Amino acid sequence: DTEVTQTPKHLVMGMTNKKSLKCEQHMGHRAMYWYKQKAKKPPELMFVYSYEKLSINESVPSRFSPECPNSSLLNLHLHALQPEDSALYLCASSQGQGADYEQYFGPGTRLTVT
Amino acid sequence: GENVEQHPSTLSVQEGDSAVIKCTYSDSASNYFPWYKQELGKRPQLIIDIRSNVGEKKDQRIAVTLNKTAKHFSLHITETQPEDSAVYFCAATRNYGQNFVFGPGTRLSVLP
């Protein structure tokens, strides 16, 4: 299996809802990432996990809460989001963290906050 | 933090011509510079990368050059084909993925 998968593909949620995005890879990669991409903009790094521990948090608001239950799975828990949080959320993984390792991206979850 | 600029924002070329996209970065500690291609509605995919101890790297029709002194790097695509049409992002980061920042992107259109 050489893919990063993400579920759901699309998600619409209200500002008071709680939802979660899921990312999975079975390539044995030990680093996993969350990015946010607004339309016609580049991806912005949110979080990096390395060996299931949070390694980088790019000053993301606490309404986004990442979780890495095991080396294959990465979740992003969402609570009390704002309409401006609507975006494509991309997950990526790499063999290790850092410049020596290529990141493989998932197809993304398109999130709309109403 | 790192700041990456990218030019041009849009680029149209005739099939078979070359395309050049240029990026500059601000963090002198950045030492890894990947380039990603993102087709409409699809995920970003790494097409080539370069590290700071190398000045140039080539992979078939794609090449990247790096001038660390001037803090700029460029993507060169030769013999462009319609399937090269996409948004191209440059990026810069330090050794362990700190300050991983993408440029704003270049929309390349290859006209048949």
Image: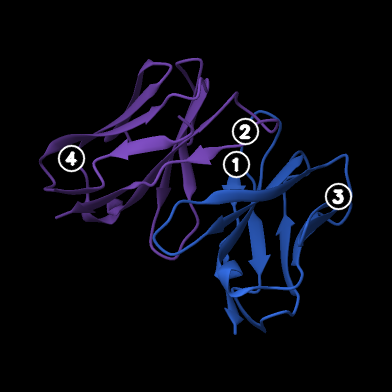
Q: Please name the amino acid that badge 2 sits on.
A: Gly
Residue B37 in percent (x, y) is at 57, 57
At numbered mark 4, what does the secondary structure look like: helix, strand or loop? loop
Q: Which residue is denoted by mark 3 in the rendering?
A: B68
Q: Chain of mark 1?
A: B
Task: Quadrant for the C terminus of chain B, please.
Answer: bottom right
Which of the 4 image quadrants contains residue A62? top left
Which chain did the renderer colour blue?
B
Q: Please name the amino acid that badge 1 sits on.
A: Phe
Labels 2 and 1 touching (C-beta < 8 A): yes
Marks 2 and 1, how far apart at CA:
6 Å
Marks 2 and 3, how far apart at CA:
18 Å
Residue B57 in percent (x, y) is at 83, 50
Work out whether disc 2 and disc 3 sit on a shared chain: yes
Q: Which residue is denoted by mark 1 in the rendering?
A: B100
Work out whether disc 2 and disc 1 sit on a shared chain: yes
